[in-house]
Amino acid sequence: MQNNKVNQMLTKKLSTFEFIIIIAMNFSAIAFSIDAILPALPEISAAMSPTSPNKTQLVISSFVIGMGIATLFTGPLSDSFGRKKIILLGGIIYITGALIASYSKTLEIMLIGRFVQGIGVAGPRVVALAIVRDLYEGRRMAQIVSIAMIFFTLVPAIAPMLGALIISNFGWRSIFIAFIVFSIVSIGWLLIRQGETLSPEHRVKFTFLNLTNSLKECLSNKIFLTSTALQALTFGILFSSLSTIQQIFDTTYNKNDSFPQWFALIALISGVASFANSLLVVKVGMRKLIEIGFMIGIIFSLSLTIFSYFTSISFLLYFIWQSSAFFMIGSIIGNLNALAMQPMGHIAGLAASIIGSISTILGVMLAIPIGLSFNGTPTPLILASFILSFLGLLLARKVLN
Protein backbone atom coordinates (compact mmCIF):
# COMPACT_ATOMS: atom_id res chain seq x y z
CA MET A 1 0.00 0.00 0.00
CA GLN A 2 2.79 2.43 0.95
CA ASN A 3 4.68 1.67 -2.28
CA ASN A 4 1.55 2.44 -4.30
CA LYS A 5 1.27 5.83 -2.60
CA VAL A 6 4.92 6.56 -3.36
CA ASN A 7 4.49 5.61 -6.99
CA GLN A 8 1.41 7.84 -7.26
CA MET A 9 3.40 10.79 -5.93
CA LEU A 10 6.28 10.11 -8.30
CA THR A 11 4.02 9.93 -11.33
CA LYS A 12 1.80 12.85 -10.33
CA LYS A 13 1.84 15.39 -13.15
CA LEU A 14 0.15 18.76 -13.08
CA SER A 15 -1.46 20.57 -15.96
CA THR A 16 1.11 22.39 -18.06
CA PHE A 17 -0.28 25.76 -17.00
CA GLU A 18 -0.07 25.13 -13.25
CA PHE A 19 3.33 23.49 -13.64
CA ILE A 20 4.69 26.54 -15.45
CA ILE A 21 3.27 28.90 -12.81
CA ILE A 22 4.90 26.93 -9.99
CA ILE A 23 8.25 26.73 -11.79
CA ALA A 24 8.08 30.45 -12.65
CA MET A 25 7.44 31.39 -9.03
CA ASN A 26 10.43 29.39 -7.84
CA PHE A 27 12.58 30.89 -10.58
CA SER A 28 11.25 34.30 -9.50
CA ALA A 29 12.54 34.02 -5.94
CA ILE A 30 15.82 35.39 -7.29
CA ALA A 31 14.25 38.31 -9.14
CA PHE A 32 12.00 39.23 -6.23
CA SER A 33 14.92 39.09 -3.77
CA ILE A 34 16.91 41.49 -5.95
CA ASP A 35 14.34 43.79 -7.53
CA ALA A 36 12.09 44.41 -4.52
CA ILE A 37 15.02 45.73 -2.49
CA LEU A 38 16.16 48.22 -5.15
CA PRO A 39 13.89 51.07 -3.91
CA ALA A 40 15.36 50.59 -0.41
CA LEU A 41 18.98 51.10 -1.47
CA PRO A 42 19.02 54.89 -0.91
CA GLU A 43 17.66 54.44 2.64
CA ILE A 44 20.04 51.54 3.34
CA SER A 45 22.91 53.68 2.06
CA ALA A 46 21.90 56.63 4.23
CA ALA A 47 21.54 54.42 7.31
CA MET A 48 24.55 52.12 6.91
CA SER A 49 27.00 53.55 4.37
CA PRO A 50 26.47 57.30 4.06
CA THR A 51 30.08 58.08 3.10
CA SER A 52 30.41 55.32 0.46
CA PRO A 53 27.08 54.95 -1.36
CA ASN A 54 28.56 52.67 -4.05
CA LYS A 55 29.14 50.02 -1.37
CA THR A 56 25.39 49.58 -1.08
CA GLN A 57 25.58 47.74 -4.43
CA LEU A 58 27.06 44.85 -2.41
CA VAL A 59 23.57 44.20 -1.03
CA ILE A 60 22.90 42.79 -4.49
CA SER A 61 26.33 41.24 -5.10
CA SER A 62 26.55 39.41 -1.75
CA PHE A 63 23.19 37.77 -2.42
CA VAL A 64 24.29 36.66 -5.89
CA ILE A 65 27.64 35.32 -4.62
CA GLY A 66 25.92 33.18 -1.97
CA MET A 67 23.54 31.89 -4.60
CA GLY A 68 26.38 31.06 -6.97
CA ILE A 69 28.38 29.10 -4.39
CA ALA A 70 25.41 27.12 -3.08
CA THR A 71 24.19 26.38 -6.58
CA LEU A 72 27.11 23.98 -7.05
CA PHE A 73 25.80 21.71 -4.28
CA THR A 74 22.02 21.89 -4.50
CA GLY A 75 21.88 19.96 -7.78
CA PRO A 76 23.87 16.90 -6.71
CA LEU A 77 22.08 16.88 -3.36
CA SER A 78 18.75 16.80 -5.20
CA ASP A 79 20.09 13.98 -7.40
CA SER A 80 20.75 12.02 -4.21
CA PHE A 81 17.90 12.91 -1.88
CA GLY A 82 15.14 14.01 -4.26
CA ARG A 83 14.07 17.37 -5.59
CA LYS A 84 11.49 18.41 -2.98
CA LYS A 85 13.64 17.87 0.13
CA ILE A 86 16.36 20.18 -1.19
CA ILE A 87 13.86 22.87 -2.15
CA LEU A 88 12.45 22.75 1.40
CA LEU A 89 15.96 23.00 2.91
CA GLY A 90 16.74 25.95 0.67
CA GLY A 91 13.58 27.71 1.83
CA ILE A 92 14.53 27.32 5.48
CA ILE A 93 18.00 28.77 4.86
CA TYR A 94 16.57 31.62 2.79
CA ILE A 95 14.16 32.62 5.55
CA THR A 96 16.99 32.51 8.11
CA GLY A 97 19.05 34.90 5.98
CA ALA A 98 16.11 37.27 5.60
CA LEU A 99 15.72 37.40 9.38
CA ILE A 100 19.44 38.15 9.86
CA ALA A 101 19.30 41.00 7.33
CA SER A 102 16.09 42.35 8.82
CA TYR A 103 17.61 42.78 12.29
CA SER A 104 21.10 43.88 11.14
CA LYS A 105 22.63 47.02 12.67
CA THR A 106 25.58 47.36 10.28
CA LEU A 107 26.07 46.96 6.55
CA GLU A 108 28.44 44.05 7.17
CA ILE A 109 25.81 42.06 9.09
CA MET A 110 23.24 42.84 6.41
CA LEU A 111 25.62 41.52 3.76
CA ILE A 112 26.00 38.29 5.76
CA GLY A 113 22.23 37.95 5.88
CA ARG A 114 21.96 38.58 2.16
CA PHE A 115 24.72 36.03 1.54
CA VAL A 116 22.76 33.43 3.55
CA GLN A 117 19.61 34.35 1.59
CA GLY A 118 21.56 33.69 -1.60
CA ILE A 119 22.60 30.27 -0.33
CA GLY A 120 18.97 29.43 0.39
CA VAL A 121 17.57 30.64 -2.93
CA ALA A 122 19.86 28.23 -4.78
CA GLY A 123 17.50 25.41 -3.78
CA PRO A 124 14.41 26.50 -5.73
CA ARG A 125 16.55 28.04 -8.47
CA VAL A 126 18.48 24.91 -9.43
CA VAL A 127 16.04 22.20 -8.46
CA ALA A 128 13.16 23.81 -10.33
CA LEU A 129 15.22 23.62 -13.52
CA ALA A 130 16.09 19.99 -12.78
CA ILE A 131 12.38 19.23 -12.33
CA VAL A 132 11.71 20.67 -15.79
CA ARG A 133 14.48 18.47 -17.19
CA ASP A 134 13.01 15.43 -15.40
CA LEU A 135 9.72 15.89 -17.25
CA TYR A 136 10.73 17.51 -20.59
CA GLU A 137 13.69 17.63 -22.97
CA GLY A 138 15.04 19.34 -26.08
CA ARG A 139 13.14 22.16 -27.72
CA ARG A 140 10.05 21.32 -25.68
CA MET A 141 12.08 21.97 -22.54
CA ALA A 142 13.35 25.26 -24.00
CA GLN A 143 9.75 26.20 -24.76
CA ILE A 144 8.59 25.40 -21.20
CA VAL A 145 11.47 27.42 -19.72
CA SER A 146 10.78 30.34 -22.04
CA ILE A 147 7.08 30.38 -21.15
CA ALA A 148 8.00 30.24 -17.46
CA MET A 149 10.26 33.23 -18.08
CA ILE A 150 7.23 35.17 -19.34
CA PHE A 151 5.54 34.79 -15.96
CA PHE A 152 8.94 35.29 -14.35
CA THR A 153 9.09 38.80 -15.85
CA LEU A 154 5.89 39.81 -14.08
CA VAL A 155 7.76 39.59 -10.77
CA PRO A 156 10.51 42.13 -11.61
CA ALA A 157 7.82 44.24 -13.26
CA ILE A 158 5.90 44.62 -10.01
CA ALA A 159 8.62 43.91 -7.42
CA PRO A 160 10.07 47.46 -7.21
CA MET A 161 6.57 48.97 -6.99
CA LEU A 162 5.57 46.45 -4.34
CA GLY A 163 8.85 47.03 -2.53
CA ALA A 164 8.37 50.81 -2.62
CA LEU A 165 4.83 50.41 -1.29
CA ILE A 166 5.96 48.18 1.57
CA ILE A 167 8.87 50.48 2.41
CA SER A 168 6.78 53.64 2.41
CA ASN A 169 4.22 52.10 4.79
CA PHE A 170 6.33 49.91 7.05
CA GLY A 171 9.96 50.98 6.61
CA TRP A 172 12.76 49.45 4.56
CA ARG A 173 13.40 46.59 6.99
CA SER A 174 9.93 45.22 6.31
CA ILE A 175 11.01 44.21 2.81
CA PHE A 176 12.72 41.20 4.35
CA ILE A 177 9.41 40.05 5.82
CA ALA A 178 7.99 40.20 2.30
CA PHE A 179 10.80 37.89 1.19
CA ILE A 180 9.78 35.39 3.85
CA VAL A 181 6.12 35.46 2.79
CA PHE A 182 7.02 35.01 -0.89
CA SER A 183 9.25 32.03 -0.06
CA ILE A 184 6.55 30.31 1.97
CA VAL A 185 3.97 30.71 -0.81
CA SER A 186 6.16 29.69 -3.77
CA ILE A 187 7.89 26.75 -2.13
CA GLY A 188 4.79 25.64 -0.25
CA TRP A 189 2.77 25.52 -3.48
CA LEU A 190 5.38 23.31 -5.14
CA LEU A 191 5.68 20.98 -2.17
CA ILE A 192 1.91 20.52 -1.91
CA ARG A 193 0.97 20.25 -5.59
CA GLN A 194 3.96 18.83 -7.47
CA GLY A 195 4.91 15.21 -6.95
CA GLU A 196 8.53 14.14 -6.62
CA THR A 197 9.99 13.83 -10.13
CA LEU A 198 13.10 11.79 -9.31
CA SER A 199 12.25 8.24 -8.34
CA PRO A 200 14.47 6.44 -5.77
CA GLU A 201 15.87 4.01 -8.35
CA HIS A 202 17.19 6.91 -10.43
CA ARG A 203 18.91 8.71 -7.60
CA VAL A 204 22.68 8.93 -7.45
CA LYS A 205 24.37 8.26 -4.13
CA PHE A 206 26.07 11.42 -2.84
CA THR A 207 29.76 10.53 -2.76
CA PHE A 208 32.77 12.58 -3.74
CA LEU A 209 33.64 9.98 -6.37
CA ASN A 210 30.25 10.29 -8.04
CA LEU A 211 30.44 14.06 -7.74
CA THR A 212 33.89 14.15 -9.30
CA ASN A 213 32.95 11.81 -12.15
CA SER A 214 29.84 13.81 -12.95
CA LEU A 215 31.78 17.05 -12.79
CA LYS A 216 34.36 15.68 -15.23
CA GLU A 217 31.60 14.61 -17.60
CA CYS A 218 30.05 18.08 -17.63
CA LEU A 219 33.35 19.90 -18.02
CA SER A 220 34.45 17.63 -20.86
CA ASN A 221 31.37 18.45 -22.93
CA LYS A 222 32.13 21.31 -25.33
CA ILE A 223 28.53 22.47 -25.69
CA PHE A 224 28.00 22.47 -21.93
CA LEU A 225 31.18 24.47 -21.32
CA THR A 226 30.38 26.98 -24.04
CA SER A 227 26.83 27.49 -22.81
CA THR A 228 28.18 28.09 -19.31
CA ALA A 229 30.70 30.67 -20.53
CA LEU A 230 28.08 32.46 -22.61
CA GLN A 231 25.72 32.56 -19.66
CA ALA A 232 28.50 34.07 -17.51
CA LEU A 233 28.94 36.89 -20.04
CA THR A 234 25.18 37.45 -20.12
CA PHE A 235 24.99 37.46 -16.32
CA GLY A 236 27.81 40.01 -16.25
CA ILE A 237 25.56 42.39 -18.18
CA LEU A 238 22.51 41.53 -16.06
CA PHE A 239 24.13 41.87 -12.63
CA SER A 240 26.01 45.06 -13.48
CA SER A 241 22.77 46.58 -14.79
CA LEU A 242 20.85 45.60 -11.66
CA SER A 243 23.60 46.90 -9.37
CA THR A 244 23.66 50.35 -10.95
CA ILE A 245 20.16 50.91 -12.30
CA GLN A 246 18.76 52.55 -9.17
CA GLN A 247 21.78 54.87 -8.87
CA ILE A 248 21.52 55.83 -12.54
CA PHE A 249 17.84 56.67 -12.21
CA ASP A 250 18.43 58.62 -9.00
CA THR A 251 21.85 60.28 -9.40
CA THR A 252 22.06 60.70 -13.17
CA TYR A 253 18.47 61.42 -14.14
CA ASN A 254 16.78 62.44 -10.86
CA LYS A 255 13.96 59.93 -11.36
CA ASN A 256 14.09 58.00 -8.10
CA ASP A 257 10.39 58.57 -7.36
CA SER A 258 9.30 57.12 -10.70
CA PHE A 259 11.94 54.37 -10.76
CA PRO A 260 9.53 51.47 -9.94
CA GLN A 261 7.26 52.36 -12.86
CA TRP A 262 10.11 52.67 -15.34
CA PHE A 263 11.66 49.42 -14.10
CA ALA A 264 8.31 47.67 -14.55
CA LEU A 265 8.19 48.79 -18.16
CA ILE A 266 11.73 47.55 -18.78
CA ALA A 267 10.88 44.18 -17.22
CA LEU A 268 7.78 43.82 -19.40
CA ILE A 269 9.87 44.50 -22.49
CA SER A 270 12.16 41.69 -21.36
CA GLY A 271 9.07 39.49 -21.08
CA VAL A 272 8.30 40.17 -24.74
CA ALA A 273 11.68 38.62 -25.58
CA SER A 274 10.86 35.47 -23.62
CA PHE A 275 7.46 35.23 -25.28
CA ALA A 276 8.96 35.67 -28.75
CA ASN A 277 11.59 33.08 -27.94
CA SER A 278 8.95 30.54 -26.86
CA LEU A 279 7.30 30.94 -30.28
CA LEU A 280 10.48 30.92 -32.36
CA VAL A 281 12.72 28.39 -30.63
CA VAL A 282 11.00 25.32 -32.06
CA LYS A 283 11.28 26.64 -35.64
CA VAL A 284 14.51 28.64 -35.56
CA GLY A 285 16.53 26.72 -32.98
CA MET A 286 18.37 27.66 -29.82
CA ARG A 287 21.77 28.38 -31.38
CA LYS A 288 20.50 30.91 -33.91
CA LEU A 289 18.45 32.78 -31.32
CA ILE A 290 21.47 32.99 -29.01
CA GLU A 291 23.46 34.66 -31.79
CA ILE A 292 20.63 37.07 -32.55
CA GLY A 293 20.45 38.03 -28.88
CA PHE A 294 24.12 38.93 -28.70
CA MET A 295 23.85 40.88 -31.96
CA ILE A 296 21.09 42.99 -30.39
CA GLY A 297 23.40 43.73 -27.47
CA ILE A 298 26.25 44.72 -29.78
CA ILE A 299 24.20 47.03 -32.00
CA PHE A 300 22.54 49.02 -29.21
CA SER A 301 25.60 49.20 -26.91
CA LEU A 302 28.05 50.18 -29.65
CA SER A 303 25.71 52.84 -31.03
CA LEU A 304 25.23 54.46 -27.63
CA THR A 305 28.92 54.19 -26.72
CA ILE A 306 29.86 56.11 -29.87
CA PHE A 307 27.09 58.63 -29.23
CA SER A 308 28.38 59.28 -25.68
CA TYR A 309 31.68 60.61 -27.05
CA PHE A 310 29.87 63.52 -28.67
CA THR A 311 27.22 64.43 -26.10
CA SER A 312 25.65 63.25 -22.86
CA ILE A 313 23.23 60.34 -22.96
CA SER A 314 19.65 61.48 -22.43
CA PHE A 315 17.27 59.54 -20.21
CA LEU A 316 15.27 58.38 -23.24
CA LEU A 317 18.36 56.92 -24.92
CA TYR A 318 19.44 55.23 -21.70
CA PHE A 319 15.96 53.78 -21.23
CA ILE A 320 15.98 52.40 -24.79
CA TRP A 321 19.40 50.89 -24.25
CA GLN A 322 18.53 49.32 -20.88
CA SER A 323 15.36 47.87 -22.39
CA SER A 324 17.37 46.39 -25.27
CA ALA A 325 19.83 44.84 -22.82
CA PHE A 326 17.06 43.18 -20.84
CA PHE A 327 15.42 42.09 -24.10
CA MET A 328 18.71 40.48 -25.14
CA ILE A 329 19.04 38.69 -21.81
CA GLY A 330 15.45 37.45 -21.99
CA SER A 331 16.07 35.98 -25.43
CA ILE A 332 19.29 34.19 -24.43
CA ILE A 333 19.14 32.71 -20.92
CA GLY A 334 16.42 30.09 -21.48
CA ASN A 335 18.13 28.83 -24.63
CA LEU A 336 21.55 28.59 -22.96
CA ASN A 337 20.12 26.60 -20.04
CA ALA A 338 18.26 24.20 -22.33
CA LEU A 339 21.28 23.79 -24.62
CA ALA A 340 23.60 22.98 -21.73
CA MET A 341 21.14 20.58 -20.07
CA GLN A 342 20.25 18.64 -23.23
CA PRO A 343 23.08 16.06 -23.03
CA MET A 344 22.93 15.86 -19.23
CA GLY A 345 19.50 14.38 -18.52
CA HIS A 346 20.96 11.50 -16.49
CA ILE A 347 22.65 13.97 -14.09
CA ALA A 348 20.25 16.88 -14.50
CA GLY A 349 20.59 18.17 -10.94
CA LEU A 350 24.38 18.35 -11.00
CA ALA A 351 24.42 19.79 -14.51
CA ALA A 352 22.00 22.54 -13.48
CA SER A 353 24.20 23.21 -10.45
CA ILE A 354 27.40 23.51 -12.45
CA ILE A 355 26.08 25.85 -15.11
CA GLY A 356 24.26 27.91 -12.50
CA SER A 357 27.18 28.13 -10.09
CA ILE A 358 29.99 28.84 -12.53
CA SER A 359 28.03 31.29 -14.66
CA THR A 360 26.70 33.15 -11.60
CA ILE A 361 30.06 33.47 -9.84
CA LEU A 362 31.86 34.54 -13.02
CA GLY A 363 28.99 36.87 -13.90
CA VAL A 364 29.08 38.66 -10.55
CA MET A 365 32.89 38.87 -10.71
CA LEU A 366 32.47 40.71 -14.01
CA ALA A 367 29.65 42.85 -12.62
CA ILE A 368 31.28 44.11 -9.40
CA PRO A 369 34.06 46.17 -11.04
CA ILE A 370 31.63 47.39 -13.69
CA GLY A 371 29.18 48.52 -11.04
CA LEU A 372 31.83 50.16 -8.85
CA SER A 373 33.06 52.12 -11.89
CA PHE A 374 29.82 54.12 -11.83
CA ASN A 375 30.82 57.76 -12.29
CA GLY A 376 27.46 59.45 -12.43
CA THR A 377 26.75 58.39 -16.03
CA PRO A 378 25.69 55.10 -17.65
CA THR A 379 28.64 55.17 -20.08
CA PRO A 380 30.90 52.64 -18.23
CA LEU A 381 28.02 50.17 -18.02
CA ILE A 382 27.11 50.52 -21.70
CA LEU A 383 30.72 50.16 -22.87
CA ALA A 384 31.22 47.06 -20.72
CA SER A 385 27.99 45.57 -22.09
CA PHE A 386 29.22 46.06 -25.64
CA ILE A 387 32.47 44.23 -24.85
CA LEU A 388 30.70 41.31 -23.18
CA SER A 389 28.13 41.02 -26.00
CA PHE A 390 30.88 41.07 -28.62
CA LEU A 391 32.81 38.32 -26.82
CA GLY A 392 29.59 36.31 -26.52
CA LEU A 393 28.85 36.49 -30.24
CA LEU A 394 32.42 35.49 -31.16
CA LEU A 395 32.31 32.48 -28.83
CA ALA A 396 28.84 31.41 -29.96
CA ARG A 397 29.76 31.52 -33.65
CA LYS A 398 33.06 29.73 -33.14
CA VAL A 399 31.81 26.84 -30.99
CA LEU A 400 28.06 26.44 -31.36
CA ASN A 401 27.91 26.40 -35.17
Image (tube, rainbow, N blue to C red):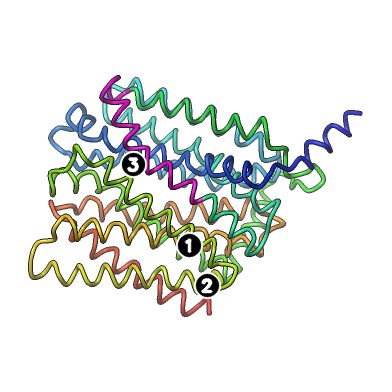
Q: Which residue is mark 2?
A: 287
Q: Which mark is residue 239?
A: none
Q: Which residue is mark 1?
A: 276
* Image coordinates for residue 76, horizontal then vertical, percent: 64, 47
Q: 121 or 162: which is nearer to us?
A: 162
Q: 158 or 138: which is nearer to us?
A: 158
Residue at 19%, 48% in the rendered image: 248
The answer to which of marks 3 and 2 sits earlier in the sequence is 3
The answer to which of marks 3 and 1 sits earlier in the sequence is 3
Question: Rounded to the nearest whole Å, what is the CA distance between mark 1 and mark 2?
Answer: 15 Å
Q: 264 or 56: which is nearer to us?
A: 264
Mark 3 or mark 1, whichever is nearer to me: 1
Mark 3 or mark 2, whichever is nearer to me: 2
Residue 156 position by quadrant: top left
Q: Amino acid at mark 1?
A: Ala
* Image coordinates for residue 304, horizontal then vertical, percent: 20, 67
Q: Which residues are magenta?
A: 149-173
Q: Can you say which quadrant of the picture contains the N terminus?
A: top right
| Disc 3 element | helix
Q: Which residue is mark 3?
A: 60
Q: Residues within 10 Å of mark 2 (few under 14, many from 20)?
A: some
Residue at 46%, 63% in the rendered image: 332
